[in-house]
Image: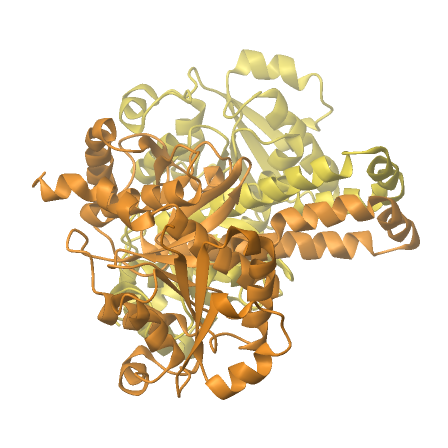
Chain colours: A orange, B yellow
């Protein structure tokens, strides 16, 4: 029997934890029960968890609960949290990886604290100088990976090349049957455009592309982020964060405006009867729950951050993401993509 | 009688020029004829323009045609264009301002060339070290001004403060009855977030806010760009360009997806009969024609760039923007906002 995929979950992190986290876990367990290839460790207050878990019908053998005394609050800053967090569910869920208990950690708690704790406990991979936060982004052809979404305000060409290689590895691990196509986000598609860091990263990626596991697709502009021609989009954390939030804001603006239009009078309300199922499918395609889960890359082990305010379905998607990342052997994919760095290239 | 607002139009710039430009002008003239407070100078090939203009019913006294031999092509780079462009419609439309013939210049031609030519001919204002490209952006409460949209890849705190003051002046000139609220685009709303340039600009704008014609609203994130709580959003040209194009791409992705959903089966098609007028209004609210026209700020005179591929309605909106900018006395608004620089602050 092969080793089971073990996911360490911070059961106390996020809004309405641990209830929502357990509801998400229930969806995951129901969908994957037959596979018998995974194990879950819940970190949190044992008394609360034991009581809550009675509302669910989990098979006992797939879940362990490890008691932790504290919870990292949303108000905590990374600085205060390091001092206060050693008995927290978050800290111990991350630490489980170096204890050899788990393959991956999932938390919906305080993002800043999770990033700092993960870096402290798991340490950087020796080949990588800065970690990156990667996210899933909808596209015409399915899903893309975009990074960095905010871990680093400023990035040089070495960072951008690292991010490309780690992003391609992440894409490959989640979508094992697809070919990763890497692009750099820029303000024009011509080679002469962009910052000096971007131009140098462009040259390096063009050279590496022949010997690597991904294809380099050059530059793209913001309006091509979702056209699916490329599926790993690399940028610095400032630009990536602004792009992500601008896309969220635009989507909300348009769907709010559509909702107002379709309920403005009796005729438009009648139309909703006929378009009900179509609009439901339209909404489902754009449902942010499906894209829930940002992956922290560049450490000796993978950490996934779920949105704190997501619903049970969103939390399920982030557990599923953890499962797929380990099943797809992310860490070895990353090492393989970074191999040329060991050779001193 | 007060002096007429005179707009110099590059009649040959943009797709389907000069026909589309004249169609846009026709809409403008029809809407504003009674005002008798404007004059139009068309720069372009006189033979072509004389022939084309016969299809329209323009009152003779409001339009002059000035013959120019060449047209700047879309393939031209700024470098080659400077040599080749001196007899072009674009060059002469910009030059009309220093000849005292026009108050503002409008072109739908090659953006890069227009920026370089404008800077060469009109020169920078002495208080400003970098020019900015500003655009209109839809919001819940109407329209906002966003800058820089791509004139400068890298900006320091002085540039960001200049852009804030020029952007507030632009907003005031277009919407004279509204109060400009300036925000810096960042990746968090806390004072400690962001680059050093952003933090310094934040401090300067907080100090200036007491004595200036606009209110400083601090930082916003990408998802707040369209909520209307702030109406002048300032960022560097790289981030601004990515944000603009990401918003465009997201809007297209969602509306394409909606279109596909609402035509996928007979029921959803029936719904369109009932929602026809509501969806038409929804579409009209988002129509990019309404936001057509980017304003080049920081030179001794204002230059407006229309999208090359816009339709007649979009070109009309860019003419209307020129008219409102001059009516709202943009250049004096800018000078007033920059006044503190003369005092050596």
Between A280 and A65, which is closer to the camera in this rendering?
A65
Q: Is residue B164 found left or right of A57 in the rendered image? A: left
Q: Residue at x 41, y 20 (%)?
A: B73
How many numbered discs?
0
Q: As drawn, which residue projects farthest toward the front?
A: A1
Give the percent coordinates (x, y) of residue B288.
61, 41
Quadrant of the snapshot with the C terminus of chain B: bottom left
Give the percent coordinates (x, y) of residue A262.
80, 52
Q: Can you see residue A88? A: yes
Q: Is residue B302 above or below residue A91?
A: above
Give the percent coordinates (x, y) of residue B24.
65, 31
Q: Is residue B251 found left or right of A307 in the rendered image? A: right
Q: Is residue B107 above or below residue A283?
A: above
Q: As drawn, which residue projects farthest toward the left?
A: A344
Q: Quadrant of residue B118?
A: top left
Q: Quadrant of residue B157?
A: bottom left
Q: Residue at x 48, y 39 (%)?
A: A223
Q: Is residue B270 found left or right of A194 in the rendered image? A: right
Between A28 and B174, which is closer to the camera in this rendering?
A28
Q: Is residue B141 above or below residue A220?
A: below
Q: Can you see residue B241? A: no
Between B260 and B192, which is closer to the camera in this rendering?
B260
Between B108 and A277, which is closer to the camera in this rendering?
A277
Give the percent coordinates (x, y) of residue B283.
72, 43
Q: Quadrant of residue A305?
A: bottom left
Q: Is residue B255 above or below residue A316?
A: above
């Amino acid at each position: 029997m092969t080793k089971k995929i073990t996911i360490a979950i911070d059961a106390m992190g996020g809004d309405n934890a641990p209830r929502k986290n357990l509801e998400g876990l229930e969806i995951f367990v129901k969908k994957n029960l037959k596979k018998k290839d995974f194990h879950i460790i819940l970190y949190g207050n044992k008394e609360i968890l034991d009581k809550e878990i009675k509302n669910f019908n989990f098979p006992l053998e797939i879940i362990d609960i490890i008691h932790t005394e504290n919870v990292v609050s949303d108000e905590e800053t990374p600085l205060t949290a390091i001092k206060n967090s050693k008995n927290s569910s978050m800290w111990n869920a991350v630490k489980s990886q170096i204890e050899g208990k788990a393959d991956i950690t999932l938390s919906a708690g305080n993002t800043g604290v999770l990033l700092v704790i993960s870096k402290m406990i798991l340490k950087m991979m020796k080949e990588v100088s800065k970690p990156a936060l990667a996210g899933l982004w909808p596209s015409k052809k399915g899903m893309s990976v975009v990074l960095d979404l905010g871990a680093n305000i400023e990035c040089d060409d070495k960072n951008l090349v690292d991010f490309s290689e780690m992003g391609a590895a992440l894409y490959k691990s989640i979508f094992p049957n697809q070919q990763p196509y890497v692009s750099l986000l820029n303000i024009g598609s011509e080679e002469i455009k962009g910052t000096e860091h971007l131009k140098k990263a462009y040259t390096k990626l063009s050279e590496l592309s022949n010997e690597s596991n991904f294809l380099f697709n050059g530059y793209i502009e913001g309006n091509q982020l979702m056209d699916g021609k490329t599926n790993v989009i690399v940028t610095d954390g400032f630009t990536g964060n602004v792009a992500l939030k601008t896309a969220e804001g635009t989507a909300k603006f348009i769907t709010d405006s559509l909702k107002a239009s379709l309920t403005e009078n009796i005729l438009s309300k009648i139309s909703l009867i006929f378009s009900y199922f179509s609009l439901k499918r339209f909404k489902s395609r754009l449902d942010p729950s499906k894209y829930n889960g940002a992956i922290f890359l560049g450490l000796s082990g993978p950490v996934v951050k779920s949105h704190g305010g997501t619903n049970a379905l969103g939390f399920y998607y982030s557990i599923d993401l953890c499962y797929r990342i380990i099943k797809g052997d992310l860490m070895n994919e990353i090492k393989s993509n970074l191999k040329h760095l060991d050779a001193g290239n």
